[in-house]
Image (spheres, rainbow, N blue to C red):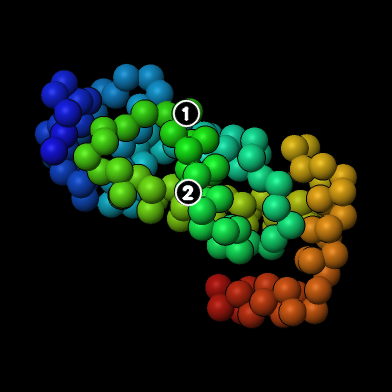
Amino acid sequence: MPIPDSPYEDLKEDALPDGLLPDLPPGWIMPTAKGFFPPKEASKNITNTLKDVFRHPVTSYHQIDEEIRNNVFFERFRTLVKWDPAPEEQVKVLFHCKASKRLSDIFSQARKQNKRPSRIGPELWETLLALFDNPEEKNKREKAKENRA
């Protein structure tokens, strides 16, 4: 049940009513059918979360232990933005989905540019490069590329 005076107490979970955009206080987000509103607020803070707490030698977000994803990554995100507590599970699912995609994008860009992201230390970067060069990982990327074509 939404808390009183919630900025989105009257909004439906799956869409904004009548196409109107809610006037949320700064730092507030809300889940929608396709992501978060406002998208830039959520996106910026998902990226900051990943950059602040990513310290894992993995090639995908889902290789990170679920407990760490929830108790470190999601909890860090919670300190950066606010939302109505009623859709907590929806926020968590959307966060993990968006974080997974964002980490994949960060890795893809870093591989293509052959440049270490600023908040990933040199030792972790060397480990990640070795993982990225693994034939199995290369094969997964090629299959994914074919599937997108």
Which residue lies at the image location 31% right of the left edge and 49% below the top edge? 89
- Judge by depth and name the residue closer to the eye, 93 or 42: 93
- Check disc 2 and report the residue beneath it: 70
How far apart in space, not on screen, are marks 1 and 2 (Cα)?
13 Å
Image quadrant where one finds the N terminus: top left
Q: Is residue 122 left or right of residue 67?
A: right
The three-letter amino acid code for the residue at tag 2 is Asn
The 10 Å Cα crowd at callout 2, few under 14, some 14 to 19, many 20 or more, is some
Quarter holding residue 112: bottom right
Q: Is residue 58 left or right of residue 95?
A: right
Image quadrant where one finds the C terminus: bottom right
Under circle 1, the secondary element is helix
Quarter holding residue 138: bottom right
Residue 58 image point, x, y percent: 69, 60
Tag 1 near tag 2, CB within 8 Å = no
- Judge by depth and name the residue closer to the eye, 67 or 80: 67
Q: Is residue 10 above or below residue 25?
A: below
Residue 14 image point, x, y percent: 21, 50
Q: Is residue 123 above or below residue 75?
A: below
Residue 34 image point, x, y percent: 34, 52
Question: Can residue 115 be spotted in the picture?
Answer: no
Which residue lies at the image location 87% right of the left edge and 45% below the top edge? 122
Name the disc covering residue 120, or none: none
Which residue lies at the image location 20% right of the left edge and 46% below the top edge? 13
- Judge by depth and name the residue closer to the eye, 149 or 70: 70
The three-letter amino acid code for the residue at tag 1 is Thr
| Comes first in the chain, label 1 or label 2 | 2
Which residue lies at the image location 46% right of the left edge and 52% below the top edge? 96
Q: Is residue 56 left or right of residue 96?
A: right
Question: Can residue 136 be spotted in the picture?
Answer: yes
Please tell me how many numbered marks the rendered image carries.
2
- Check disc 1 and report the residue beneath it: 79
